[in-house]
Image: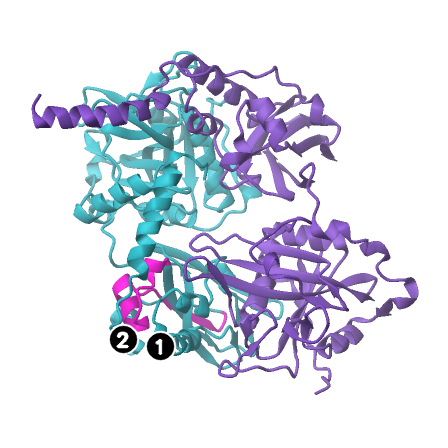
Chain colours: A purple, B cyan
Amino acid sequence: MSRITKTIAKILIVILPACLPLSGCGGRAYVVEPFDPGSFLERAHSETQDGVTVQTTVVSADETELIFGLPLYDSGVQPVWIRVQNNTDKRLRYAPVSTDRYYFAPLEVSYVNRSGFSDDARDQMNWRFHELAMPRRIQAGESVEGFVFTHMQAGTKGFNIDLFGDDVEYRFNFFVTLPGFVADHSEIDLQDLYAEDELAHISEKQFLTSFANLPCCTSDANGNETGSPLGIAIIGQGKDVLHGLLRGRWREVAANETFAGTATGDYYYFGRPQDATFIYEGRKAIDGYYELRLWLAPQTVDDKPVWLGQLRQFFAHRWTQHRPDPDTDNAQSFLLQNIWYSGTLLKYSILQTSHKVGIDDQHTDFQNGAYFTVGRRSALWISGDAVPLNKVQEIKFSGDTHD
Amino acid sequence: MISGKANGWRKIGLCLALLVGTSGCASGWQPMPIDEVAFLDRAVTHEMDSIRVTAAVPSARESRAIFGADTYRRGVQPVWIEIENSSAAPVAFLPFGLDAEYFTPLESASMHNEKSQQGEMERYFFSSGVNPNIAPGQIRSGFVFTHVDEGTKAFNIDLIGDEFTWQHTFFIQVPGLKVDHYNVDFDGMFSEDEILAVDDQELIEAFRSMPCCTANAKDTNSGDPLNIAVIGDPREVYYAFVRAGWDETEIVKASSGFKTAISFITGGEYRYSPVSSLYVFGRPQDVAFQKARDNIHERNHLRLWMTNYKYEGRTVWIGQISRDIGVRFTPKTITTHKVDPNVDETREYLVENLAYNQALAKFAYVSGAVPAPIDAPRQNLTGDGYFTDGLRVVLWITAEPVPIDEIEAVDWPDKPQ
């Protein structure tokens, strides 16, 4: 055997076993039970608009494996089940991009998971995904159902189901919490956090004056050391605030979650750690994120609760570390725009406080996070209804701040 | 992305890239004043309602000169804007409209390993950022740090004031990418006497009689179905697809081949990878666009050929769209991209993609491809099976944004089930 032949033989010995699982020769069978939505129908969310009823739910990791015979959650795929009952006299079209702009095609999901299965099993798998996919077209008087394959979202998933017909459009908006998920804020009884006599019901102007004069920063547990600036106030009912943030692609932090940010420990305000934490990880190019910690304040403005917040951006730094962006004003600006473009910002006010920290004189919080700020605070009113970009109102505030 | 075997390669590739990136070259940090870098020559200006906005995008080389750091290699593309507010009221610029995931100046600076001058560098980036608040009579300029778009960068500039909004889409060519359609002479493609003006019925007949499928260069084998048609002049089509997030395609040359190969191995995102030539009317595609999802194996491709038909004075195109869903082995080329066999799914995606980006005015369906049921699929040139109802979707492209509820579904005889 020549040297070349020997080399080729060695390469084949290495490559062939590696290729076998991909080739489809042999391989395991694809076994799934007949599909029955009954197991999750009772928890499906339902809404009707002018003769069109939509039911939907997000199936859990276990349910997904049962239905499709594959651990799709492990590969970042989360099926959403949809049923549309069209009681109108018009044919409708469902747009999967409304549910996930980058949805996976059904046969794409089966193709990526084909490894290890026999040829017959792959055909069965393709057929299963094709058959159970949500159809695009719903004839007048018809009911259709199926799955759309979306990107994984832990916690509560916010998504749309848009339907279009001749001169008609139906836009459904759902927020579905995954079975078993417990957000950090679910563990706090926010309803009874304050007794009625502890709550101050104040006007918009009173609130802005009060907000401009609050202590600058959060603290450690004992209140001895200073944390980061408390630059945010969100005014809105809890459900509207939650949905507004989810629409902006923020996600809830689970009660037991050890996240890069939460692992650094709690920050304190009103003598307690944050009531809720939200993370924005929508960034692609680098592994950075924003972290928003909220505290329910003992105030209501026009009967709406007030949530005070500390917001920091963290960006990837030297391999594995995350470093907080010292420019906290930039993070405030991001949140304002994020909610604005998500269509839930009703009005806002930018306040000037006396807590100015220059870029050349940066402060360091008790968790070693340096920051500087021009002393700005942002108050954001969140709406439960969609607000067009050009209808957002700015509240000019020229009240006094106590130096 | 859907995690798969490519993920492991991707991580190895990422680690190698990191090693290269962090190896450091302590040659000192030397930024250059922007008036010494010629990128402002390519600036584009739009003016309306007493607001004048000028924008320019430095190339990779120009950005390296301005910031003394290879920002493109870190995925950061600075966009320079100047806003002149001649109105009587203050306005604010919202960088979110330009890039919803823009980088902050300090974040952009921190990506570069200039230990001895890190603080100085951060201050420089910080002072280069644009102040978003522009008082009446004021002119402000500076950079926004965005994600890299090569070829043509399409972005919005959104300004807001008291009961006032100013929005405009900018399209700016960034030097450095050799794009396939830059060398195509669209104006001279057909002589005056070759151009046929058609009405509705004639257009339907024209689409029905066009080739069913793409072909190889010798026209001996047929490939993917010609399942899309577009009506719009070259500039409208180009802007509409770029606005809808489609990337242009680089011509085949040594560097593009290398970038494609690296992306293939690592699963990385080379958004402008050259595409193979498919033939219609005896010539390869006039223009190709692609839309990467997470890596080179997961992207949609579309190819367009200009026809000699004109409908209501606008150019008629025939085309093909497919969705790459992974990689497979072939005897001829060793590996090729696997195409989603449900080509109608990809066709319908395009309708929605353009509609949600307000680039679609009307659409209709017409027969012309060959129907192939799921249990009797046809094959393309690389042997991938596909099934289809045999319809083409006809897309009337619009340069002016059209809200989704104002798109017209044209009532032609052929309709999908």
Outermost residue on the bottom side: it is A403
Q: Are marks 1 and 2 in contact (CB under 8 Å)?
A: yes
Measuring from the top left, give residue A190's x and y in whole percent.
80, 55
Q: Is residue B57 above or below residue A249?
A: below
Instruction: Tell me which corner region of the image, top left, top right, bottom left or bottom right, holds residue A328.
Output: bottom right
Give the secondary structure at mark 1: helix
Question: Magenta segment: does it hold B136?
Answer: no
- Residue type at mark 1 is Gln
Q: Is residue B69 left or right of residue A190?
A: left
Task: Give me the chain letter of mark 2.
Answer: B
Label 2 element class:
loop
The chain that hosts pointer 1 is: B
Q: Nearer the viewer, residue B394 or B148?
A: B148
Badge 2 is on which residue?
A: B28
Task: Please provide the residue range marked out in magenta.
Answer: B49-75
On the image, which quarter does residue A24 sit in? Answer: top left
Could you tell me residue B208's position as x and y percent? 35, 22
Which of the labelled discs sits on residue A275, or is there none?
Answer: none
At 28% across and 43% down in the image, what residue appears? Answer: B273
Could you tell me how many numbered marks the image carries? 2
A249 left or right of B146 in image: right
Q: Which residue is mark 1?
A: B117
Residue B259 in the figure: left or right of residue A274 = left
Q: Position of residue B288 (x, y in %)?
A: 30, 40
